[in-house]
Image (spheres, coloured by chain):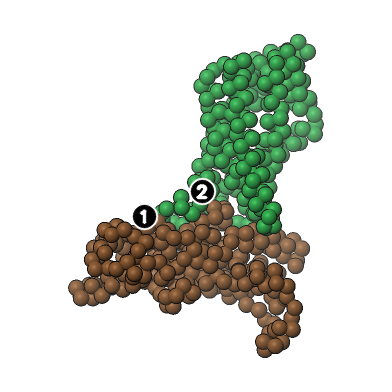
Chain colours: A green, B brown
Amino acid sequence: MFLRKTIIALTGLFLCIFLIVHLSANSILVLPEEMARGLYNSYSTTLRESPLIKIVAYVLYLSIVLHVIYALLIVLNNRKAKSKRYLLNRNRENSSWTSQNMGLLGIMILLFIVVHLANFWARIKLGLGENVALDANGHVDVYEVTYSLFRNIYYVVFYTILMIPLGLHLNHGLKSAFKTLGFYHKKGLRVLAKISLVYAAVMAVGFGLIPFIVFLK
Amino acid sequence: MKIVFKIWRQVNSKSQGGFETYEVDGLTEDMSFLEALDYLNERLVQRNEKVIAYEYDCREGICGQCGVFINGRAHGPHDNITTCQLHMRSFKDGETVVVEPWRAAAFPVIKDLVVDRSAFDRIIEQGGYISARTGTAAEANAILVGKEVVDRAMDAAACIGCGACVATCKNASAALFTAAKINHLNSLPQGKPEASNRVLEMTRQMELEGFGSCTFTGACEVECPEEIPMINIAEMNARRVKAKWLGK
């Protein structure tokens, strides 16, 4: 179990770092169109063509898969350890709802990832669905893919609402990962709790707001 | 005052068990929760019914025997106390109070509200002791230990093994108990000779007993009568990594 928890913590932390990069890139989308289109498309082309990023991408896929599989194994084992439940359990009084429902939040995020990959990754990388045009510089027009997707209000709402479970999951996950790995500095943990909260809020609000801005532009 | 008790009754570990409701009149606010159960049992004896089995010993909050789940909380509605330190004034007149045994696969119910906590003993057997001869008090005082280390060790040593951490944990994790026992001994010079084995063996036994993993909900430190903080679990994790990969 300790090994499993360590794998969940390490993959989780890697995914946390990935999200920072992802959000930074996404923020290009809110720039004025003439700047944003060229910048965003050349950025994504650079990423796709870099052999280093190719390795990072595989680490990323692997991280998501391992994070999910080991979380599932841990949950199954924990369920077995608590086979009988209480008739009345007031766990709201001793712990946060988030900490009690990381699995549920994780499933919601996984659902989001599946839709998100179908929207972008499947079209751009696998070439499924509608053909993606090239922009004036001959780059794949990922900018257009994004803007056409977020003309649909349902997608905007879906992308925004599912950033709530992401934020909650990150807030508990980031600080817990450090504790799982054995970080036990008292003041450090207090600072870490604040960092986790700020990080989670920035991620949730950042990712959640961009589809709206795109929709309104 | 009157209380409607809804209490888990179970004949033995193999039987099914279920809730029974008892309306008890004539309780006073000054009664401890255990005294209220005693009072109910006296009425049951008078009615020639089987008494409710529950555990207690010291009734002064230091033995850790009186673990029961009361109205959705380990040891009742207050933070960081034992059941014997809970008084009936914490409930409203006429209130329904649900009383359940600790729930964990590693703590099977023996009878009614009594569970088998010997899994804790087997964790202790794997290293919750020291082999060094400590000698007399004078000799022990000759070993210099810093105040901060002593305080941390003492805080962890305060664990009374009541099992509230396991009971309240959604994963029935024994991480807080095991961490307290490990950190108490591993932080002191007398505990150093077996430090590495202690953390590896005790955590191994913890898993063998069928306790779940810690997901840091923090419920344990709120219910622990000795207020042992959750940071102990992170410290145990660090000690485990060190013992496992560095061999110390």
Q: Of B223 and A108, which appears nearest the observer?
A: B223
Visible in this render: residue A4? no
**Residue at the spot 41% in from the left edge and 61% down from the top edge:** B76
Visible in this render: residue B92? yes
A216 up-or-down from B191: above or below: above
At label 2, the amino acid type is: Ser
A153 up-or-down from B21: above or below: above
**Residue at the spot 75% in from the left edge and 66% down from the top edge:** B247
Residue at the disc numbered 2: A96
Badge 2: residue crowd in 10 Å (few <14, some 14–19, many ≥20): some
Q: Of B61 and A72, which appears nearest the observer?
A: B61
A126 up-or-down from B42: above or below: above
The residue mark sitting in front, 1 or 2, is: 2
At label 1, the amino acid type is: Leu
Q: Of A166 and B201, which appears nearest the observer?
A: A166
Sequence-earlier tag: 1 or 2: 1
As measured in the structure, the alpha-carbon distance from the residue carrying label 1 to the one carrying label 2 is 20 Å
**Residue at the spot 77% in from the left edge and 63% down from the top edge:** B246
Label 2 secondary element = loop
- Residue B115 at what x, y percent from top left? 42, 69
Please state if B113 lies on the left or on the right of A121 as rendered: left
> In which quadrant of the rendered image does the C terminus of chain A lie?
top right
- Mark number for residue A87? 1
Please state if B63 lies on the left or on the right of A129 as rendered: left
Most extreme residue toward the left, as rendered?
Answer: B47
